[in-house]
Image (cartoon, rainbow, N blue to C red):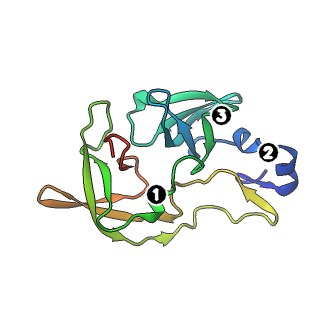
Amino acid sequence: MDGGYVQVSELRASTSMWRQVLQVGDYVDGRMALNKKWFECKVVECDADSVTLHFMGWAKTFNSSFARTSPYIQKLHTNVPSWRSKLKLSQEVEVASSLTITPTTEWKLLPITGIRAAVPSTKEPAPLPGAIRFNPISLHDDIGTAMEVQFGRSKKWVSAITDKICLRGTHFCS
């Protein structure tokens, strides 16, 4: 393996290898025990047998550890739609009202009033010939994609890859 990539022959040897190469900073889908829903998650800790996930849009108190073999960890966008790459004007998203997400953070359902295009990411190393990337480095392939939302009388730009925005229905019934 090199830079998170593996050769096709290695992939055939182990269809669950993607779980073994998970590292801090990778993104996956994770199932939260609290509400039994799937969310985008970021790996925040890991060892040989387990990973700790941060559920995007939730306070750190909801972080959970899972065995690497747990069925409650799946490849990114297996159970959660790739909604960040499909943001549209007037689409409603949930936005955190504070910079730090805590269990008491107030969430607002706000329409997107603007979208700023991004430059395609160049952070990932080029893949080796015949290599397959198991775990996306980012939630969205473009760096700098942002959306503008209306907060009362003012407008605010928010990164599309922050956990301070959530898909409608994360905290509110849709």
Q: Mark 1 points at which residue?
A: 83
Measured Cα–Cα span from mark 2 to mark 1: 26 Å
Seen at 41% across and 27% down, the residue is 61
Image x and y of residue 21, in percent: 71, 42
Cβ–Cβ below 8 Å for labels 3 and 2? no
Helix, strand, or loop for circle 3? loop
Crowd around label 1: few <14 · some 14–19 · many ≥20 (10 Å): some
Looking at the rendered structure, the kind of residue marked 2 is Thr
In space, the residues marked 1 and 3 are separated at their CA atoms by 22 Å
Q: Which mark is residue 71?
A: 3
Image side of residue 63 versus residue 135, left or right: left
Residue at left offset 70%, top offset 40% = 19
Mark 2 / mark 1, whichever is N-terminal: 2
N-terminal of the pair, mark 1 or mark 3, is: 3
Q: Which residue is drawn at 37% across and 58% down?
A: 159
Q: Can residue 43 be seen in this view?
A: no
Whole-angstrom CA distance, mark 3 to mark 2, is: 14 Å
Q: Between residues 165 and 44, which one lies in front from this camera angle?
A: 165
Q: In the structure shown, which secondary structural element does the residue marked by tag 1 occupy? A: helix
Amino acid beneath label 3: Pro
Dot label at residue 118: none
Q: Which residue in the structure is indicated by mark 2?
A: 15
Residue at 26% from the left image edge and 50% from the top image edge = 109
Coordinates of residue 150 in the picture (x, y in percent): 20, 59
Give x and y (percent) for residue 164.
35, 47
In the rendered view, would you say 86 is above or below 152? below
